[in-house]
Amino acid sequence: MIEKRTIELIAPSGYPHDPTALHLALQRLRAQGHHVENIHATQRRYQRFAGTDGQRAAELNRLADPSRELPDIVLAVRGGYGAVRLLHGLDYDGLQRRLRDQPIAFVGHSDFTAVQLALLAQSGVTTFGGPMLVGDFGAPEVSAFTMRHFWHALSEPTFTITSRVAQAQSADVTGTLWGGNLAVLTSLVGTPYLPPVEGGILFLEDVNEQPFRLERAIYQLQLAGILERQQALLLGDFSGGKQFEYDNGYDLNAMIEQVRSVIGIPVITGLQFGHIPDMVTLPVGAKAHLQADAHGFRLTVSGHPVLE
Amino acid sequence: MIEKRTIELIAPSGYPHDPTALHLALQRLRAQGHHVENIHATQRRYQRFAGTDGQRAAELNRLADPSRELPDIVLAVRGGYGAVRLLHGLDYDGLQRRLRDQPIAFVGHSDFTAVQLALLAQSGVTTFGGPMLVGDFGAPEVSAFTMRHFWHALSEPTFTITSRVAQAQSADVTGTLWGGNLAVLTSLVGTPYLPPVEGGILFLEDVNEQPFRLERAIYQLQLAGILERQQALLLGDFSGGKQFEYDNGYDLNAMIEQVRSVIGIPVITGLQFGHIPDMVTLPVGAKAHLQADAHGFRLTVSGHPVLE
């Protein structure tokens, strides 16, 4: 049974372009008894953004206000692009103070990765990579897998994700779980908004990117010394990258083999995370134990904010 | 009159896929009396690359060999992707020693930007952003503009590029000229291969990228503190980015206005550099004086390697 929760919407990136999906999402959340706040975020439009930079930043900074009640969940409306514009204007100190005593569950993925990594880097706030309002809660058929994993991750102090995808490399490591969208994460390299995680387990996903672009991004993490400070790389979904005759046999698998030959840490594959209907929810900044071998992997997570 | 030169080919990125363009390019260079070496580089193929990583790196490292004669010009066969794979394996010390006494003209653009920036960062070698073998020397109709600028830049100790494109911001600055392809340049942020240029004039171009991707890359340069250490941003060609209804008025101009509102240095536009038929040749690492006002801009360059 799912408890009734207060869910506050934020839209730090693009505006929702599918009114049917938006309607479905709100209807479904309300039908479960949840109280959905800040619907206004779904109605703003400025160019390709869900409002001006000021409007979108204010929405996040309001969460630092000590005089207001906090929601249980802060849910990103959708991804797209635009979060990086807000990073230099967020009230990191205020958010750190306010959320230290009352942790809440920020949830989203894709472009939301920028907000998640900045919150972890600057405020020490652990958030969740997980479903978003329009694309997931508003999907034509909502995924029972995604919903089960979402509520489980937000409710259980310790949870485990298992996979039977055979692994070419084994691992048995414990460290900080972090990551998100590869393009967004690499766009923060060299900035104060990429958390300096040591000994971490880094999960990555991306969509509609050719394998060479993914490889170039992973090379940036390698050449910047970030991968050598991690214990494992956990690859999610990377679908939608086009193949061309010119590629001449270079594909996603060839890219992963190249990465394996260059980085000194295990590369574990088959994580159900990314721009896919059935996705797990993963904390960004919690502790995790990853075990992988020829039979699959187990990822056990703890230390994330838990709904009471 | 053009002197007869020794031109050594290198192919650190993709293989050439247009045999007609390749044939035309070689024919034209030979018809002018130039001696073209290492044709072999145009014949190798490994996946989407012009040879294995080892073959492509060896081609660059051979230039450090003190026992061999050096060419006048080292010309990149084409761009594509793959140069970043070589960066950790280049003989920067050897190249620095060999090229200090006998400067040669490395020329290319696009993915070649990675090699150029790494050579500047690690060996202090000034190279040229300019035409490449297949796409430019092998174009169906070779551009007289591109050729004139190319030979002029390689032959004159001081040269000036002028533009009558009206400027929204003025500038009168002197500093190190550097830059290249935006996506490739930003993929080096945080790595030892991005030169730590202070007080520079940064030129950028890119092709087939949506404005939001260009903006995200420029934000990375801003948030990483790189733009605040430059004196001006000089924008080349950014054509080929698709527009979508979703963009809702956000386009290349809106992106440039956003960048202007965020970075504290003048943004000068209209540089004829990039993936275009008529392109100037620009040193990466030389000294430049940029003057811009409502009537256009003047860029005067000196201190680059000059063919004797």
Image (tube, coloured by chain):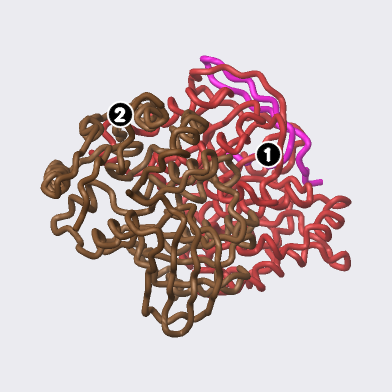
Chain colours: A brown, B red
Q: Is residue B290 left or right of residue A260?
A: right
Say which quarter of the image contains residue A62.
top left
Answer few, some or many: residues within 10 Å of disc 2's Cα (few below 14, many 20 plus, some between 14 and 19). many
Residue A131 in the image: above or below residue B49: above
Q: In this view, does A282 lie to the left or right of B259?
A: left
Chain ID at mark 2: A
Say which quarter of the image contains residue B63.
bottom right
Q: Of the numbered discs in the image, which one, if any, rests on residue A51?
A: 2
Q: Can residue B277 be seen in this view?
A: no
Question: Which amino acid, mark 1?
Answer: His
Q: Which of B76 and B7 is in front in this view?
A: B76
Q: Which of A205 and B288 is in front in this view?
A: A205
Q: Which residue is drawn at 46% across and 61% down?
A: A203
Does the magenta run of residues contain B296? yes
Residue A30: x %, y % from top left: 14, 44
| Highlighted magenta segment, given as a residue range | B279-308
Residue A237: x %, y % from top left: 37, 64
Q: Which residue is drawn at 37% across and 73% down?
A: A162
Question: Which amino acid, mark 2?
Answer: Gly
Chain ID at mark 1: B
Residue B80 in the image: above or below residue A268: above
Q: Of the numbered discs in the image, which one, if any, rests on residue B152?
A: 1
Q: Which of B124 and B147 is in front in this view?
A: B124
Q: Nearer the viewer, residue B189 or A227?
A: A227
- Our reading of the magenta stretch's main secondary structure is strand
> Which structural element holds mark 1?
helix
Residue B307: x %, y % from top left: 78, 46
Q: Which residue is drawn at 23% across and 34% down?
A: A37
Q: Residue at x 25, y 62 (%)?
A: A148
